Amino acid sequence: MARRKKIYEGKAKILYEGPEPGTIVQYFKDDATAFNAEKKDVIDGKGVLNNRLSEFFMTGLNQIGVPTHFIRRLNMREQLVRNCEIIPLEVIVRNYAAGSISKRLGIAEGTQLPRPIVEYCYKDDALGDPLVTEEHIAAFGWAGQQDMDDILSLALRVNDFMSGVMLAVGIRLVDFKIEIGRVYDGDFQRLIVADEISPDSCRLWDIETGQKLDKDVFRRDLGNLTDAYSEVARRLGVLPQSNVNKPTLIN
Ligand code: TMP
Ligand code: ASP
């Protein structure tokens, strides 16, 4: 296939113009970054795993009626997605304390939160994606009140789905980040889950051992990131049992 026009290159993905109007090809790179790209590496096979895992989660969400941008996987590293206007927010849902909330509020990592807590960060690398409140979001016009109601409902549905799927394979969904996009069907606007859902954007801990199976392995130098992601994929049946360490995919 002729190389498509590049629309955008981010830290972990490249977006190309899709084959039909309103579509985008999302290419998953092997690049890993943390702390706003202060720490960088190339992790062999990460893109292949995240392409497949994001497909798995987004397909499940589509099946239970949570709309996502995902259309279909094209190959090992690329998926076809619906073009949408990304709302400039990182929507974070936390079930257990970890990472920035532990630091900010002095809560020990692993403490179960009284209920899922939803936080919003303004998507701006130059500012380091700062935490913002609904006041900022409304005042600066990033999203309206109806959007915020819909975003909250989408975030909590994704949380219930992801928590259940992970629990079934012995993994605790500690927290995750999603991005939301706007699509237009004629004059009608609706919101869908966009970007990716993968161990890059979640915290996943083994329920028995507490072993980290997400990007904290890279952020905190805890071992081999591909092994961790492969373990998640293997448990979910996304990788064949015999090929734990190699991102060879089943169809
Ligand atoms: P945090 O504890 O660092 O705020 O992260 C919360 C969740 O959001 C965690 O699952 C990792 C994810 N995340 C991203 O996907 N991208 C980011 O840039 C950051 C900082 C966190
Ligand atoms: N994605 C962010 C970065 O690259 C931060 C992170 O995930 O820790 O730099």
Image (cartoon, rainbow, N blue to C red):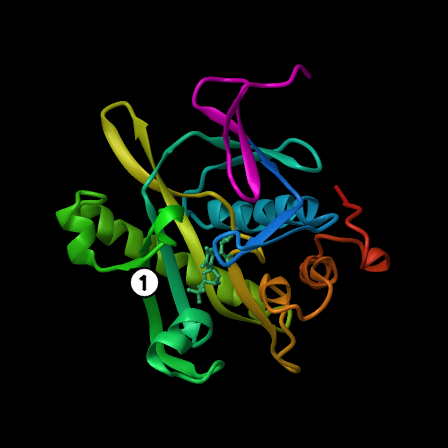
Please state if 214 lies on the left or on the right of 102 as rendered: right
On screen, residue 204 above or below 210? above
Q: Position of residue 212 (x, y in %)?
A: 62, 71
* Residue at the (46%, 74%) spot, across then down: 98
Residue located beneath label 1 in the image: 119
On whether ligand 1 comes within 8 Å of the CB at mark 1, the answer is: yes
Write the start and end of the magenta stretch as one range: 1-25
Q: Residues within 10 Å of mark 1 (few under 14, many from 20)?
A: some
For the N terminus, give its image quadrant. Answer: top right
Q: Quadrant of residue 231?
A: bottom right
Asked if residue 16 lies in the magenta stretch, the reply is yes
Residue 101: horizontal and vertical position, in percent? 38, 73
In this rendering, position of residue 157 left or right of residue 202: left
Helix, strand or loop for disc 1: strand
Q: Residue furthest right?
A: 242
In this orientation, which residue lies closer to the viewer: 75 or 218? 218
Number of labelled discs? 1
The location of residue 67, given as percent across then percent down, is: 41, 43
Residue type at mark 1?
Glu
